């Protein structure tokens, strides 16, 4: 069985726009589309660009085979002329983008498509569905792992989203710094490390907690992780050590006051001679709760819903907008209230300002340390001073030329995040400025920035 076409993972109006453009002669006009977000979620200084690798794969499978064309014809979506054009469709244009794992700010042109109008307009939904989801997950994952510091985090969100989305989420979370995933398909497809513990159902299936633990240890060895909060945490820890001995790999706590329970668990494990046994905590964790657990003797975190969906993962808010048409290019822009865009093909650079430079805000103390800012311009010329270009060539003439392995993407994100040099605002108490807020750099949030012309 060959690859499944991604061509119908789209909205109807994209095909009808192509149909109309073919009739009017506009289909072959050169065009430039850009992907950007107008604003970042509240109190987030940056997002993490992710999904580029998945998008490149999906683009290669974006074609209309007999099955897709037959259904379009039977449904009367487009004319016969459009069907003939779609039957030969293969993207032949150019795509430049931020490297996957890069930080982005409001107005960042994270992806630029140059092609004919018809070729480029067809990609809108595919591009946005992949990049919005993956970037939202990677951004949440990065904030979570920043809060976790050197403690590893396991992605456990598969049961909170659609099965296909769960695999994509595991990949994006890994880019954002998660150490492993519980999702086996993600492990198989992307080579991610997989990890897992045990369920309360397993414990409840046995006449006693002790029998459950003994069965798990006999099957998986003393290095396994035992879930100790089904009944009573102290009793569970004692039963776990009796079953596995002092070489017990780990215990997991999934409920209660996790900070307090972690302190008690660590003390009891040490008392029982299991000083090397690790402590895993789970249970609706997010960046805030993990930051609050920083002083607790936790060894590993497990995060599910708040990295793959829900309030912990606000959308990246990417839009796909036409910014130039014609040969030579003519800048075009929306003037809709609240949704104004800026015309012209953009280039982006990250300017690194000298140590000690501050960017104060009214009422906040001056802050010292590295400062960076993104410069977005309709000129390809680099800004004065130290800077680096943010876009790289990804697709040329319809062929992928940039496809780094996932470990490289993950490592790249770690490097660029380290350059920020300030704790993300989202980790501080909501509504109150945190350390470094006065100098968080990048483009101002809350509005789309004008380009440097």
Image: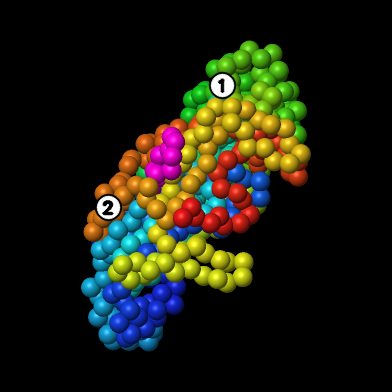
Protein image colouring: rainbow
Q: Which residue is drawn at 23% across and 73% down?
A: 88
Quadrant where the N terminus lies? bottom left
Along the line of sight, the residue nearer the viewer: 350 or 152: 350
Q: Which residue is drawn at 49% across and 55% down?
A: 451
Disc 2 and disc 1 in contact, CB within 8 angstroms: no
Confirm whether the magenta stretch covers residue 387: yes
Q: Upstream in the sequence, badge 2 or badge 1? A: 1
Question: Residue 405 location in percent, x, y?
Answer: 33, 40
Q: Principal SS element in the magenta part? A: loop
> In the image, which is nearer the foreground, mark 2 or mark 1?
2
Eyeballing the image, is 331 above or below 68? above
Q: Which residue is drawn at 27% across and 85% down?
A: 81
Q: Within 10 angstroms of label 2, few (less than 14), some, or many (20 or more) residues?
A: some
Over which residues does the magenta segment extend? 382-391
- Asked if residue 127 shows in the view, the reply is no
Q: Which residue is drawn at 72% across and 32% down?
A: 365
Question: Residue 234 location in percent, x, y?
Answer: 73, 26
Eyeballing the image, is 125 above or below 400? below
Question: Residue 333 location in percent, x, y?
Answer: 48, 68
The alpha-carbon separation of the residues under discs 2 and 1 comes to: 48 Å
Which quarter of the figure has residue 384?
A: top left
Which quarter of the figure has residue 33?
A: bottom left
Kind of element beneath mark 1: loop
Q: Mark 2 points at which residue?
A: 400
Along the line of sight, the residue nearer the viewer: 391 or 152: 391
Confirm whether the magenta stretch covers residue 350: no
Eyeballing the image, is 169 above or below 27? above
Q: Name the residue under label 1.
A: 248
């Amino acid at each position: 069985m060959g690859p499944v076409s991604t061509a119908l993972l789209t909205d109807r109006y994209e095909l009808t726009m192509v149909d109309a453009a073919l009739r009017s002669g506009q289909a072959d006009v050169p065009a430039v589309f850009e992907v950007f977000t107008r604003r970042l979620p509240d109190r987030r200084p940056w997002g993490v660009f992710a999904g580029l690798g998945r998008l490149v794969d999906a683009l290669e499978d974006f074609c209309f085979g007999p099955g897709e064309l037959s259904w379009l014809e039977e449904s009367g979506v487009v004319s016969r002329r459009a069907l003939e054009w779609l039957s030969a469709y293969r993207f032949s244009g150019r795509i430049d983008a931020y490297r996957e794992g890069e930080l982005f700010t409001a107005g960042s042109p994270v992806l630029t498509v140059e092609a004919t109008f018809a070729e480029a307009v067809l990609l809108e939904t595919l591009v946005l569905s992949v990049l919005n989801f993956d970037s939202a997950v990677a951004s949440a994952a990065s904030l979570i792992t920043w809060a976790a510091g050197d403690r590893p985090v396991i992605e456990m969100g598969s049961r909170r989203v659609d099965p296909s989305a769960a695999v994509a989420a595991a990949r994006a979370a890994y880019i954002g710094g998660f150490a492993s995933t519980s999702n086996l398909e993600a492990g198989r497809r992307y080579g991610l490390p997989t990890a897992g513990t045990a369920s309360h159902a397993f414990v409840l299936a046995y006449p006693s907690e002790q029998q459950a633990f003994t069965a798990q240890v006999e099957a998986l060895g003393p290095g396994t992780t035992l879930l100790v909060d089904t009944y009573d945490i102290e009793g569970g820890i004692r039963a776990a050590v009796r079953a596995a001995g002092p070489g017990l790999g780990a215990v997991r706590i999934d409920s209660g006051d996790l900070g307090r329970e972690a302190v008690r668990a660590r003390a009891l494990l040490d008392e029982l001679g299991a000083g090397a046994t690790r402590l895993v905590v789970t249970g609706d964790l997010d960046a805030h709760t993990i930051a609050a657990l920083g002083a607790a003797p936790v060894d590993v975190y497990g995060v599910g819903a708040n990295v793959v969906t829900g309030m912990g993962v606000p959308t990246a808010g990417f839009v796909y907008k036409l910014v130039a048409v014609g040969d030579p290019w003519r800048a075009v822009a929306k003037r809709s209230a609240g949704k104004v865009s800026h015309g012209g093909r953009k280039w982006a650079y990250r300017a690194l300002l000298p140590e000690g430079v501050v960017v104060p805000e009214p009422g906040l103390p001056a802050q010292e340390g590295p400062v960076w800012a993104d410069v977005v311009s309709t000129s390809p010329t680099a800004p004065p001073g130290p800077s680096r270009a943010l876009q790289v060539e990804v697709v040329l003439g319809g062929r992928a030329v940039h496809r780094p392995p996932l470990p490289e993407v993950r490592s790249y994100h770690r490097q660029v995040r380290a350059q920020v040099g300030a704790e993300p605002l989202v980790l501080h108490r909501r509504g109150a400025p945190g350390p470094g807020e006065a100098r968080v750099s990048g483009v101002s949030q809350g509005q789309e920035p004008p380009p440097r012309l």
